[in-house]
Amino acid sequence: MSADDDTIFDLAMQHNLNEIVRFHNVVRGSLSEHLREHRDDKYARAALTNYDNYLSINTFLMIYSYFEEYLYLLWKKKAKTVKRTRSFSIKGYESVLLEFGVPLTNPSWMYMLKATSVRHCLLHANGRLSFMTHPPEQEIRAIVVQYPEELFIRNEDQLVIAVGFVRRFVDEVRNFRNAIAYQQQGGDAHEINDIGSAAGAGGRTPII
């Protein structure tokens, strides 16, 4: 890819992530308004609280899908000669990371592997820990312990994610993309624009 193509690719990926974040923020803002309107209706409040939980889960899954797409396009457009390792998870792209000079000990990548386990539990077991075999239930519980106030276990079996975990996930996705850009640009990455304020043209839209 040419330098111009690289810039367009990075800006497009930045825009797509920001759009998911904006979707979350708009819906969450609407739910907050409804909660205020129905503050004296415990049944409505219970339903709206559930919707807020659903929003965190679905936003997390949307961002994870976005990250998978990013890894695939990164490989296909910029490292197509690199052979991916055999894996049904994002670990299959570890050879691509190494090609870009990003170590497998990169903190953001290590976080993504934990997020992958969370994603598997939510997507394939509807959050039920007792249904998990790959990864095992014990692994999910260990991850929950690492992120208090962000991950919870309800009724001893149901995995619940709070908005704080989604916020952290967005930040780690952006940090990872910046790490890739940094390696590509020799320390002068245009992707660093992603760190700007939400009001800027290339700004980073925050999760509310």
Image (tube, helix red, strand yellow):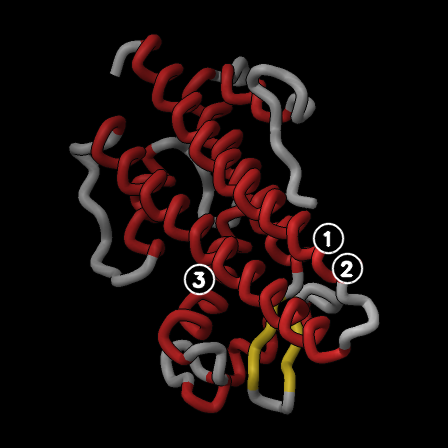
Q: Secondary structure at mark 1?
A: helix
Q: Say which residue appears at 41% left-offset and 30% top-offset.
A: 13
Q: Say which residue appears at 43% left-offset and 33% top-offset.
A: 16
Q: Position of residue 66 (x, y in %)?
A: 39, 44
Q: Which residue is mark 2?
A: 37
* CA distance for labels 2 and 1: 6 Å
Q: Say which residue appears at 16% left-offset and 33% top-offset.
A: 81
Q: Is residue 110 left or right of residue 152?
A: left
Q: Which residue is mark 3?
A: 116
**Quarter holding the N terminus?**
top left
Identify which amino acid the numbered label 2 is placed on.
Answer: Glu
Q: Which residue is mark 1?
A: 33
Residue 138 seen in the figure: yes
* CA distance for labels 3 and 1: 32 Å
Q: Secondary structure at mark 2?
A: helix
Query: Are discs 2 and 1 less than 8 Å apart at CB?
Result: yes
Q: Earlier in the sequence, mark 3 or mark 1?
A: 1
Q: Position of residue 8 (x, y in %)?
A: 36, 17
Identify which amino acid the numbered label 1 is placed on.
Answer: Glu
Q: In this view of the protein, which residue sits in the foreground, 95 or 46?
A: 46
- Please state the total of marks drawn on the protein image: 3
Q: Is residue 124 left or right of residue 169?
A: left
